[in-house]
Structure formats: structure tokens, C-alpha cells
Amino acid sequence: MTAPCERARAALPEYLAESLGEADRRALRDHLAVCAACRAEAAAADPTLLFAFANPPEVSSAEVASVVESVRAGIALRQAERRIAPPAPSRPSRRGARAAAVAAVLLLTLAISSGPPRSAPTAPSAPAVKSVEAASAAQNAPGVSVVASPEGAPKASGGATVYDWNPGAGEPRVVWIVDGSLDI
Amino acid sequence: MELVYSESRRRQETAQAADRELVAEARGGDLLAFEALVARKTPAVLAVARRVVGNSEDARDVAQMVFLRVWEQLDRYDPTWSFNTWLYRIATNLAIDFLRSSRSRERAHGATLHLVRQREESTSLETTRAAEDGELERLFERVSHRLSAKQKAAFVLREMEDRDTKEIAEILNCGESTVRNHLFNARRILRREIARLYPGLLRSETKS
């Protein structure tokens, strides 16, 4: 028995216990790969070592080509699915509608605070209708006609402006309170 | 002991540079570069998948899923990581999922038939031939049936693919001590199954 064989056989228990350093482990495997006598000795010590020297299964070029082809087809299919995917739902989410309403209110607030002329503490009714239109567009509710109700005129209350919109015909009444002092 | 690094390891390191270039091009949307990468990596992915799931046909399905997932997640790949480790991680996890689902199907439909087949095959297998390469793969498939999917994957990566425990821990997303635990239990179960299914193999080995 040669010196490398002796070292290899002495290292087997540590190899099986996973306590051999990576470099020594690799050196042992390299030795076992070329030394049939030590390989037989190792398999006798522990038959699970037989699997350490099983060559990887052969993969033919036809198999590789088949995988490449199926992957190419899979990618093409997914790309096509993305292209023909139905557009996002036309009805925006509740959060989107809320954000649009807040934006409309902010716009309105700016218009009220900077827009000339400011003749009265109460805002004119037109902005109220505009804001209602913006909210209605945001909610995209079909069949709802935007008509300012007789009560559509805004009322000032302290630092806030109250907009009251009642479309009638069984539709819910909407009341907005725009507080210019709030920093959103 | 002589500190000799194996030739296959050196080849792997050289090949990694070429992988990096292809990955960079594929990340830029170059489908041809990606296909070249698939062609380069298919043998390695098929080898792991075949050893974990146990047959070539299922391994091809797994390989296809692996590369489709790689394509979809390329933009999430961190190039500071080894591409091979990332690829092995996807491949091993998909193979484990596949093995688990096929085992549960087997339990539901064909457990009895499988056991009958296993016994017939074990009696007809000549133990001397079992030591041959092709037979070793089949022998492994028969005796590894009692391993959990993670134990099997850890054993395949460590003993058959010669990966170090740190990399296996990254692939399996667990600690190195867990990997060592999986390996310890896998060896124990494999020894028991070899003794149960192939007592002749044990006798012939202990004689030599």
C-alpha cells in the first residue's frame, strides 16, 4: 500500500463524519477516483460511499436541444400571454378613487385660495360642480349624471369649506369638507 | 495529505467567467445569449434534477421549469453571488417540490404497486453489476426512497455533486449544521436501506 493510500484510508472516518476540511476532502475524493483498491476499501467501510463515485448521468446533445427548444417555446408563450393579457380593470380601485378625490379637493383648495376674484367667503358653485365631476370621473360610475343639486353651493364653516352634492334619483348624497388648514 | 484540487473544480472556475458574460447579456434581454446559457447549464441541471426526482422524463420537465424561472427572475439575480449557486438553488428547490408532489401522488394511487416493483427489481439485480456507473444511479434511486426530499437533495449535492456544505446551505436556504444533520441522517437511512434491499452487496463488500 502506498503512502497516499494509507493517508486516504486513515481519513475515511473523518470524511464520513463530515469533519474533514474541504481541501483534504477533495484530495481524498481525487485519490479514491483513481485508486480502485482504496475505493473498494471505502465501500466496504460504508456502502454509501459507492455513490460518491457514480459518474453524472450522461446527457445527450438531443436532450440539451430538447430542453433549449422547450424553454424557447415557454418564453414565447409567456411573452404572448403578456401581450394579449386583458387590460387592467377599467374601474379603479377604491384607493385610486380616494387618491383622485383627494387630488381634486387639493386642486379645488388651491383654486379657492389663489383664484381671483375672492369676493365672498363662500366659494362659487362652479368649483363645487368641478370637484364633483372630478370625483365622478375618478369613480367612473356609469349612468350617473353630474348635476349640482340645489344644495350644491358650498358653505363656509370656520376654517373649512363644506360642499354638499345631492344627485338625487336614489343616488347617495355626497358631502365634502375641505379644510385648508390641514397639511396633507 | 496532499492538498490537490481536482481538475474538474479548476474547469468549473474557468467556465464561470464565460457564464458571467452570458448572464450579463441575458439580463439585457438578449434571448440568444440566454439560450446559449441554457445549453451550457442543461447537463448540470438535468443531472441534479434526475438524481433528486429519480427519472429522466421528470427531470426534463423540472429543467424546463428551472430555466423559465431563471429567465423571469434574471433581473432579481445579484451578480455578486455565484450564478451556479443561484441556478442550483432554483433547480434543487423545484426538484424538491416536484419530488414531494410526485410522492404524495404515489402515496395516493400507487404505493402498493411501487413496493411490489421494488422487491422484484431488488431480487433480480446482480450485486456485482450494481457497482457499475449506470447501475449506481438506479441503486441510489431504489435505496433513497425513504429519504426526505431535503435529505436526498443534500446528499446528492454533497456526495454526488461534490458541493461544499456552505454552498449547500445557501442552496437549501438553511444553516450548515442543518445540512450536516441532513447528511448524517441520509447516510444512516441509506445504510439501512442497502442492508434491507441489497444484503448481498453488503456481504460481498465486507468480504473484500
Image: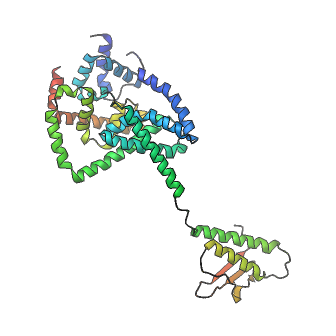
* On screen, residue B3 above or below A125: above
**Residue B72 versus residue B169: which sits nearer the camera?**
B72
Q: Is residue B145 visible?
A: yes
Task: Indicate the position of residue B144 as horizontal and vertical percent values.
Answer: 26, 38
Q: Is residue A48 visible?
A: no
The image quarter in which residue B4 lies: top left
Residue shown at 32% from the left, 25% from the top: A14
**Going by the image, does A7 lie left or right of A78?**
left
Residue shown at 80% from the left, 73% from the top: A113
Task: Indicate the position of residue A10 as horizontal and vertical percent values.
Answer: 29, 18
Residue shown at 33% from the left, 18% from the top: A31
Task: Indicate the position of residue B38 as horizontal and vertical percent values.
Answer: 46, 37
Task: Indicate the position of residue A17 as horizontal and vertical percent values.
Answer: 31, 29
The image quarter in which residue A104 lies: bottom right
* On screen, residue B29 above or below B105: above
**Going by the image, does B67 lie left or right of B120?**
right
Residue shown at 21% from the left, 28% from the top: B130
Furthest toward the top, the residue is: A2
**Residue B103 versus residue B42: which sits nearer the camera?**
B42
**Residue B116 versus residue B68: which sits nearer the camera?**
B68
